[in-house]
Amino acid sequence: MSIVSSTKPFMHTILTNSAEEAAAILNRGGVVAFPTETVYGLGAGICHQEAIRQVFRAKGRPGDNPLIVHISHVIQLANVANEVNFDAQKLIEHFFPGPLTLVLKKNPCVPETVTAGLQTVGIRCPVNPVAQEFLRFAHCPVAAPSANLSGLPSATSWEAVYEDLDGKIDCVLCGTPSSIGLESTIVDCSGSHPLLLRAGAITLEQLQAIVPAIVTQTTIEKGASPKSPGLKYPHYAPKAAIILCLTHETMVTEPSSAYIGLSEPPQGVSLFKLCESLEEYGRELFSFFRHCDAEGIHRIYCEQPPVQGLGRAIRDRLERAAGHE
Ligand code: TXA
Ligand code: MG
């Protein structure tokens, strides 16, 4: 009886800052992490089935959770989407390239391993210049989830990618830390009503200024199963317990606790991150979670910003990290 191993043996992970070298590895069927303005992505060419499978294995990602397809230019949309309706066109005009993913009906060229069997596909065109360069060198669009182990906070630096995935992927394209630090906004334009599936740096208010009909899923179907398969899985959670709070006055801290927020930190925390703006809060959140784990912190007190603008995305990640979905 032969034993077939489902995982690849230990792989040598190359670190490079050459987008051309990283893309050459991808074009040979490799799995390559690359920087984007939101978080680092873990890429495989959509024409490389085995590489796509390795992306799922390396992350420990459930097979029913689809990957976003990344393109370097709007011209490539026709290769991945079947139908770009009027709402989608307006969003593309305003927000591509950038931190927005659109869910559209898929083109048959996109394999179902990428979309986890769905007939829709998430499409994103990042604006980060290194991501752009890498995607231009790639011979086909690049399927990429966030470059972290499933369930852990997304990686916003190449060091965080390396910590999670060294030995499991072929290459890390090392860029600067992600300037936004939170995953892209996702809007589903494949059905009759445009739906905000995941809040991000492009805010609901900005989206509604262009397409007023966009609503959040909870607005129309409270308690309905999420339209984005990934949202049912635990997310963004460090080892430390996440305690959500509105102001630091409500906190009772103990040793080995930490704080992140916009208000002054409470007395007695071992570590804190005082953010000057919501932008800084979003950018620093996941790296702070990872830092707290490295320092052996047991509890992280997180100030909840109001549910508006970028605050909506930060609150969403905090609630998921705290297990309050
Ligand atoms: O900013 C980002 O979006 C980053 C960078 C690398 O682009 N990517 C990212 O990928 O956050 P990931 O896999 O961690 O999260 C993608 C989310 C998942 O919740 C997945 O279920 C959802 O997008 N998704 C992907 N394709 C979908 C589809 N066709 N319909 C609904 N949801 C979809
Ligand atoms: Mg992710």
Image (cartoon, helix red, strand yellow):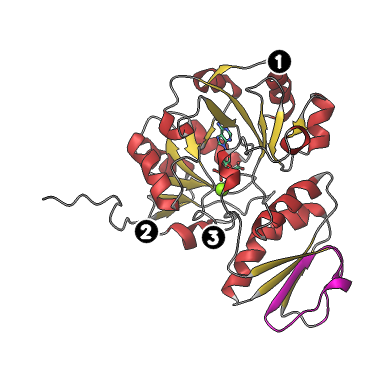
**Can residue 266 be found in the magenta stretch?**
yes
Which residue is found at the position 72% from the left and 74% from the top?
Answer: 258
Q: Residue 202 location, x and y as percent? A: 75, 38
Q: Amino acid at mark 3?
A: Ala
Which residue is found at the position 47% from the left and 40% from the top?
Answer: 64
Whole-angstrom CA distance, mark 1 to mark 3, is 39 Å
Q: Nearer the viewer, residue 92 or 320?
A: 320
Circles 3 and 2 in contact, beta carbons < 8 Å: no
- The extreme front residue here reads 223
Quadrant assignment, res 32: top left
What type of secondary structure mainly makes up the magenta span?
loop
Task: Identify the residue position indicated by label 2 in the image.
Answer: 167
Q: Element type at marker 3? A: helix
Task: Identify the residue position indicated by label 3 in the image.
Answer: 160
Whole-angstrom CA distance, mark 3 to mark 2, is 14 Å
Which residue is found at the position 69% from the left and 59% from the top?
Answer: 285
Quadrant assignment, res 188: top right
**Can residue 228 be found in the magenta stretch?**
no
Q: Residue 137 location, x and y as percent? A: 46, 33
Q: Element type at marker 2? A: loop
Q: Amino acid at mark 2?
A: Gly
- The numbered mark, 1 or 3, whose residue comes first in the sequence reads 1
Q: Is residue 267 above or below residue 232?
A: below
Q: Element type at marker 1? A: helix
Task: Identify the residue position indicated by label 1 in the image.
Answer: 86
Q: Is residue 227 above or below residue 33?
A: above
Q: Amino acid at mark 1?
A: Phe
Residue 120 appears anywhere in the view? yes
- The numbered mark, 3 or 2, whose residue comes first in the sequence reads 3
| Residue segment shown in magenta | 246-267
Residue 28 appears anywhere in the view? no
